[in-house]
Image (spheres, helix red, strand yellow):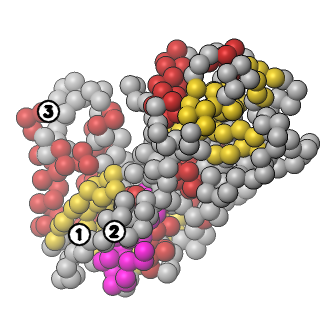
Amino acid sequence: MGKVIDCFAGGGGASTGIEQALGRPCDVAVNHDPKAIAMHRANHPRTYHMTEDIFEADLRAVIGDEPVGVMWASPDCTSHSRAKGSKPRLSGLRMLPWAVHRHAAEIRPDVIFMENVAEIRKWGPLGSDGRPIKSREGEEYRRFVDAMGELGYEFDCRELVASDFGAPTSRKRWYAVLRRDGLPIRWPEPTHGDGLFGAPPVPASSCIDFSDIGSSIFERKRPLADATCRRIARGIRKFVVDDPSPFIVPIGYGERMGQKPRVESVHRPLGTIVAGGTKRYLCTPWLMKYYGGVTGQRIDVPLGTITAGFGGHFALVSSFLVKYYGCGTGQSLGRPLDTITAKDRFGLASVVIDGEEYAIADIFLRMLKPEELKRAQGFPRDYIIDRYDDGRPVPKGQQVKMIGNSVVPVMARAIVEANMGLPTRP
């Protein structure tokens, strides 16, 4: 097959998928960020790592005269993404795909795989204000494709959604396959999706640690911002009060000091119900997105696109429900001796579930953890994100950045398998 190279390797999402597809590690990984390389090296110790600017990297000096079978390239997409809005772009980042052309001309890989945001198709020149020139949208993109064709590469591209292939995220990206070996370009068939392709989508709930619900929004030292409170209120209305089938997690109570929280699976029968009625609660969680004007999403569908920003812009919000007896009381999780009345907080904000009426007793909130985001992005559970190869701890913000910037491993695996002669696994 020849050498396998991962350009723009980051924390290792593409390398992980490629290794799963080919049954062997990448030979070379390139990235300008020493922190990304340190995380990549912790997980891919058999790969040769280059901490260099992709335009300056001398791949020929590393691989010698050996042929290159596969090159994966995921140039930084932030200056192409529509999430950038009307803000000025960084022209240097927008030129990164030309590094792919430069290396293709020098080492001539048999197959090149690329990943980027869908807006890459609109890649064109910037005006003096640093913003794309509307009338010239797609001009640079077409020039790039033509230039790759002059090197002998057949080109095809598609926009694919990761949840259609078994990842717990609905991340949508542009993928391109370029071949100069005379074989046809192939695309993997979707394997998941609402009964259309066989298996149902993998939900976000499969990645969530329900033993950690967070802390009450009413007992914070620093009050939540008004915008956050409005998002929570909209979420309660949409995903709890007005939802005919909210996602329910039964919460056990009465743990001993040091005992693991008795959080029961929503997919298993409810445990013994005690006569007092205040030993058990229902929790209706949903995911709040920190995007302007967005309410959030249900937890039983794939997670939305994970970004590199702190916390991934996702928070777990949980409304604790207690059986409502008109003037009855209930205890919120985490306060063994404190009895609160539903009316004290939400009055008649009641929810009917399977004919039973419940009142909202409390609302808990926390950001999603890096480990949860890692699983939602489709990384293996044993993938190391909390420490570098030398044992130094990785700050949480850096962990999230690595995850948000990474290629979904499931997608790299599926696309490489489809084109390198191996069957696509379900």
Q: Quadrant of the N terminus?
A: bottom left
Outermost residue to the right? 257
Q: Amino acid at mark 2?
A: Phe
For this rendering, which residue is in front, 240 or 388?
240
Residue 354, numbered circle? none
- Tell me where residue 231 appears, x and y as whole percent: 48, 24
Tell me, yes or no, whether the highlighted magenta stretch contains residue 38: no
Distance of mark 2 from mark 3, alpha carbons?
40 Å
- Tell me where residue 303 appears, x and y as whole percent: 47, 48
Residue 261 sits above or below residue 342 on the image: below
Query: Which of pointers 3 and 1 lies earlier in the amino acid sequence?
Result: 3
Q: Amino acid at mark 3?
A: Ile
The answer to whether marks 2 and 3 mark residues whose Cβ atoms lie closer than 8 Å is: no
Say which of marks 2 and 3 sits in front. 2
- Tell me where residue 382 appears, x and y as whole percent: 64, 64
| Residue placed under numbered mark 3 in the picture | 133
SS category of the residue bearing label 1: strand
| Residue placed under numbered mark 2 in the picture | 197
Q: Amino acid at mark 1?
A: Leu
| Residue placed under numbered mark 1 in the picture | 178
Identified at 22% across, 75% down, the residue is: 185
- Tell me where residue 385 appears, x and y as whole percent: 62, 54
Query: Does the image show residue 78?
Result: yes
Label 1 crowd (10 A; few <14 / some 14-19 / many >=20): many
Identified at 82% across, 50% down, the residue is: 260
Query: Does the image show residue 90?
Result: no
Specify the segment rendered in magenta. 400-426
Label 2 crowd (10 A; few <14 / some 14-19 / many >=20): some
What is the number of callouts on the image?
3
